[in-house]
Amino acid sequence: MLKSVLCVALVGVLCSVQAKGEGDAYFSIAEKAYQSKGYKKALEYFKKAASMGDAAGYNNLGNLYENGEGVQKNLQRALEYHKKACELGFKDACHRIK
């Protein structure tokens, strides 16, 4: 029984690590797109990173909406993304929403 529980826990950890890796990969693609002013592509990949639980992805989505980069400027949506980033522990986002 203990062996089964440990196996399930290990699988959970490995899946979490894989998701984190995918989130990091999406974030990296988004960053490169953003730096070359490919805001639409950056938006797409920041969303993918955020969907994997990436706090920086949420924060950067907030920045895109705050600045109207690749999207229509929407301060309410920006605030929502910054709040989510803050909830996930992204301190810069916490400072932005105060």
Image: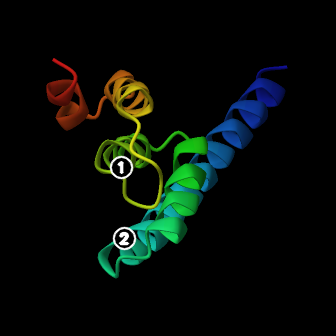
Viewer-side residue, 23 vs 3: 23
41 left or right, relative to 39: right
Q: Quadrant of residue 65?
A: top left
Residue 14 screen position, x and y as percent: 65, 48
Where disc 2 sits, the SS reads helix
Residue 21: tell me if it is visible: no
Disc on res. 60: 1
Mark 1 or mark 2, earlier in chain: 2
Disc 1, disc 2: CB below 8 Å?
yes
As drawn, the residue found furthest toward the front would be: 72
Circle 2: residue type: Tyr
62 left or right, relative to 5: left
Q: Provide the residue designation for mark 2.
A: 34
Report how far apart the C-alphas of labels 1 and 2 lie in the structure.
10 Å
Q: Which quarter shows the N terminus?
A: top right
Viewer-side residue, 65 vs 2: 65
32 left or right, relative to 49: left
Where disc 1 sits, the SS reads helix
Residue at image position (42%, 25%) is 80
In this rendering, is residue 93 above or below 50?
Answer: above
In this rendering, is residue 41 above or below 79?
Answer: below
Residue at image position (39%, 44%) is 73
Residue 37 screen position, x and y as percent: 35, 76
